[in-house]
């Protein structure tokens, strides 16, 4: 039984270190650049979408 308890404790120690590394990886991402790229992508997609809607509705918005 002591061997099982030791394995469980080691698992949670390893899991804690893995979780810390995961949060460090998320913290190191430059979120501002990602949000800027998403915003530019949405603006670029909006132009053709409006033209498609105009063509689909025969010019009636």
Image (spheres, grey):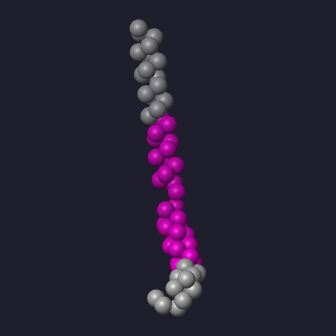
Instruction: Please determine whether, in this image, residue 25 is positioned above or below residue 57.
Output: above
- Per the image, is 42 magenta? yes
| Horizontal and vertical percent position of residue 11 | 47, 25
- Judge whether residue 50 can be spotted in this image: no
Which residue corresponds to the image point at 55% horizontal and 70% vertical from the top-left? 37
| Horizontal and vertical percent position of residue 19 | 46, 39
* Quarter of the figure that contains the N terminus: top left
Which residue corresponds to the image point at 43% horizontal and 28% vertical from the top-left? 12
Instruction: Please determine whether, in this image, residue 20 is positioned above or below residue 32.
Output: above
- Judge whether residue 18 can be spotted in this image: yes
Give whichever of 2, 42 is nearer the camera: 42
Which residue corresponds to the image point at 50% horizontal and 42% vertical from the top-left? 21
Give whichever of 60, 11 is nearer the camera: 60
Which is the main secondary structure of the residues drawn in magenta? helix
Q: Residue furthest bottom?
A: 59
Tell whether 57 sits left or right of 8: right
Give whichever of 32, 39 is nearer the camera: 39
Tell whether 5 sits left or right of 59: left
Q: Which residues are magenta?
A: 17-46
Instruction: Please determine whether, in this image, residue 25 is positioned above or below residue 2.
Output: below
Total numbered circles: 0
- Per the image, is 8 magenta? no
Tell whether 56 sits left or right of 9: right
| Horizontal and vertical percent position of residue 24 | 49, 47
Q: Residue furthest top?
A: 1
| Horizontal and vertical percent position of residue 28 | 51, 54
Which residue corresponds to the image point at 55% horizontal and 79% vertical from the top-left? 49
């Amino acid at each position: 039984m002591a061997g099982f308890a030791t394995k469980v404790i080691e698992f949670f120690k390893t899991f804690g270190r893995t979780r810390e590394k995961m949060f460090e990886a998320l913290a190191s991402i430059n979120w501002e650049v990602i949000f800027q790229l998403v915003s530019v992508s949405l603006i670029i997609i909006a132009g053709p979408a409006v033209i498609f809607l105009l063509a689909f509705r025969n010019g009636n918005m």
